[in-house]
Image (cartoon, rainbow, N blue to C red):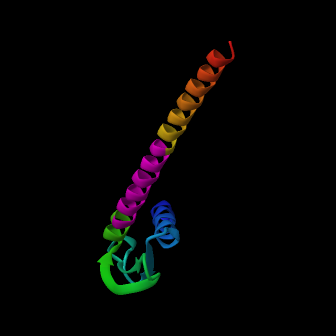
Amino acid sequence: MPDQTRSSDAIRQLIIINYPFKVKKSLNSCPPRRIPWTIWKLDDKKGKLNKPELTTYIEAVSLTMAKKKELNEKQNKRKKKCEHQQRNAERNWRKKREKYARRKK
């Protein structure tokens, strides 16, 4: 039993710390998996908190995980784009260098 509460505490902290949501426990008396959670979604543009939604613990976890996955995908896209631009820049620079080397001969 203590292991289960420890893991649920870890997940709870993960949810609270995570970027897109601010989560608070509504009831203390429930067992960990049945706790209703209130989620305040952040409005990205204004930086204000939207209307609270009452949700279960597992839904809160899955929502958080989904948002985390979405953010990772965005970051990966950005990384790929940067790598692509860097490769192009290197290739162009190499071409220019060869062109000037041919001129000097």
Query: In this picture, is 57 found above or below 105?
Result: below
| Residue lying at 51% horizontally and 39% vertically, measured from the top left | 83
| Residue lying at 31% horizontally and 69% vertically, measured from the top left | 59
The magenta stretch spans residue 77: yes
Report if residue 83 is visible in the image. Answer: yes
What is the x, y in percent for residue 32?
Answer: 39, 72
Front residue of 29 and 10 = 10
Front residue of 83 and 53 = 83
Q: Is residue 58 left or right of residue 17?
A: left
Q: In this view, does 67 lie to the left or right of 85?
A: left
| Residue lying at 55% horizontally and 36% vertically, measured from the top left | 89
Q: Residue furthest top?
A: 105
Q: Is the magenta stretch mostly helix, strand or loop?
A: helix
| Residue lying at 42% horizontally and 85% vertically, measured from the top left | 49
The magenta stretch spans residue 100: no
Report if residue 27 is visible in the image. Answer: no
Q: In this view, does 17 lie to the left or right of 104?
A: left
Query: In this picture, is 75 found above or below 2?
Result: above
Instruction: Please provide the residue range marked out in magenta.
Output: 63-81
Q: How many labels does the image show?
A: 0
Q: Quadrant of residue 20?
A: bottom left
Q: In this view, does 25 lie to the left or right of 59?
A: right
Front residue of 77 and 26 = 77
Q: Quadrant of the C terminus?
A: top right
What is the x, y in percent for residue 50?
Answer: 37, 85
Q: Quadrant of residue 62?
A: bottom left
What is the x, y in percent for residue 103?
Answer: 64, 18
What is the x, y in percent for residue 12?
Answer: 47, 70
